[in-house]
Image (tube, rainbow, N blue to C red):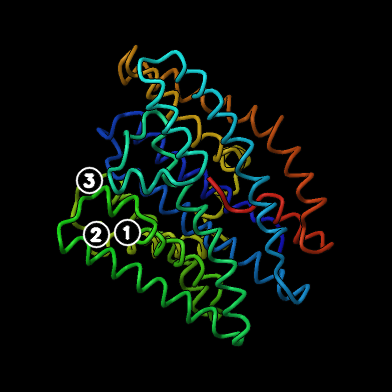
Amino acid sequence: MHRIREFDGLRAVAVTMVVLFHAFRGAALTGGLIGVDIFFVLSGYLITTLLVIEQKKTGRISLLKFYARRACRLVPALWIVLAFCLSLAFWSTKPGEHLTTIAEAATYTINWYVALGIGPPGWIIGHTWSLAIEEQFYLIWPIILIVALSFGPRAPIRVAIAIFALSTAMCVLLSAFNFSVVRIYDGFDTRSSELFVGCILALISLPPTTAHLLTRSWIVPVTICLIVVFTLHLNSRFLGFGGLQFVALMAAWMIVAAQGDTVFGSVLRQRHVVYIGRISYGIYLWHYVLLEMLVKRFGAPLAALIGVPLCVALAAASFEWVERPILRMSARYFSPTENSAMRSLASDPASH
């Protein structure tokens, strides 16, 4: 499986939504955080694809190499941001509280602290809740997939559908009992359904006619997502009663459509769009930290004008000088096979 530039384009779209939402404090693009949903679905799809390819090529899935690849991809950039935040914490008025939050982010548990209202709020790194959810997915899904594969080639799809259904049911149940939006939005049990939409898409074989139809009708999911971006509010009950899963399904549709020879695909393949997608993880990490710092000093409009270009520059520097060299090392030592196409994909798998 070769590198798919359109997926980098989708990452660029997703991170742009999130950055603009935070830059304008939710006043514009009120539903911009659905960019996170796109990231979740894409992660589930690509990680599952990589694991299935590995199983077919080698006859097994190496958990050790998988976790090593994930660590090489995610940890260096995160730790740079956390080191920056650590320096700020020591000069703040609440160093102990901020150090606790940094520890939660570093251990990929911050989503549960936020969801359950335990301890201090997320400070300037509260956005790492989504990274925690993805990391929890990475920890459990490969193990579940290995076990499922031992029961036959069709077992994984049944398991993925079952987990999706359970997560969706949990989301609806908590909403019906009036649990807080934060609990529903940040809990792995409720948000994992979106990751498993991606898993299901990776495990099914779409008939060519269906794939063609979904590709040619790309304007439907794109239009729906644009409507959601400009109209949805985070406190909407729509989210808990199937809204998150609906957006995830639209994201899955866009993943299929992105790979076709359409206007949508050609836009996503543009060189600058692709590069923004490649550095989207760093952009996501830096944007909230910088915006939260700057808005207190300059106000939202000026903070956005300064913070957004700065976070892009820092993300590019992080990618070129830190992440890319480590990814090359990861591809050399932790690729599941010597197949060059797979190595190309493994060197930059799905992530923020």
Residue visible at 35% across and 67% down in the picture: 167
Tag 1 or tag 3, which sits nearer the N-term? 3
In this orientation, which residue lies closer to the viewer: 114 or 315?
Answer: 114
Q: CA distance from mark 3 to mark 1?
A: 12 Å
Q: CA distance from mark 1 to mark 2?
A: 7 Å
Q: Nearer the viewer, mark 3 or mark 2?
A: 2
Residue visible at 27% across and 51% down in the picture: 183
Residue where numbered disc 3 is placed: 233
Tag 1: residue type? Leu
Tag 2: residue type? Gly
- Point out residue 112 in the picture as x, y percentages from the top left corner: 37, 49
Query: Which numbered disc covers residue 244?
Result: 1
**For mark 2, does the 10 Å Cα neighbourhood hold few (<14), some (14 to 19), or many (20 or more) residues?**
many
Tag 2 or tag 3, which sits nearer the N-term? 3
Q: Quadrant of residue 251?
A: bottom left
Q: Is residue 198 left or right of residue 224?
A: right
Secondary element at tag 1: helix
Residue visible at 39% across and 47% down in the picture: 111
User: Can you name the residue that lies furthest to the front here?
Assistant: 96
The quadrant in which the N terminus is found is bottom right
Secondary element at tag 3: loop
Residue where numbered disc 2 is placed: 240
**For mark 3, does the 10 Å Cα neighbourhood hold few (<14), some (14 to 19), or many (20 or more) residues?**
some
Q: Is residue 334 above or below residue 61?
A: above
Marks 3,1: beta carbons within 8 A: no
Secondary element at tag 2: helix
Tag 3: residue type? His
- Point out residue 69 in the picture as x, y percentages from the top left corner: 69, 52
Marks 3,2: beta carbons within 8 A: no
In this orientation, which residue lies closer to the viewer: 202 or 262?
Answer: 202
In this orientation, which residue lies closer to the viewer: 29 or 26?
Answer: 26
Marks 1,2: beta carbons within 8 A: yes
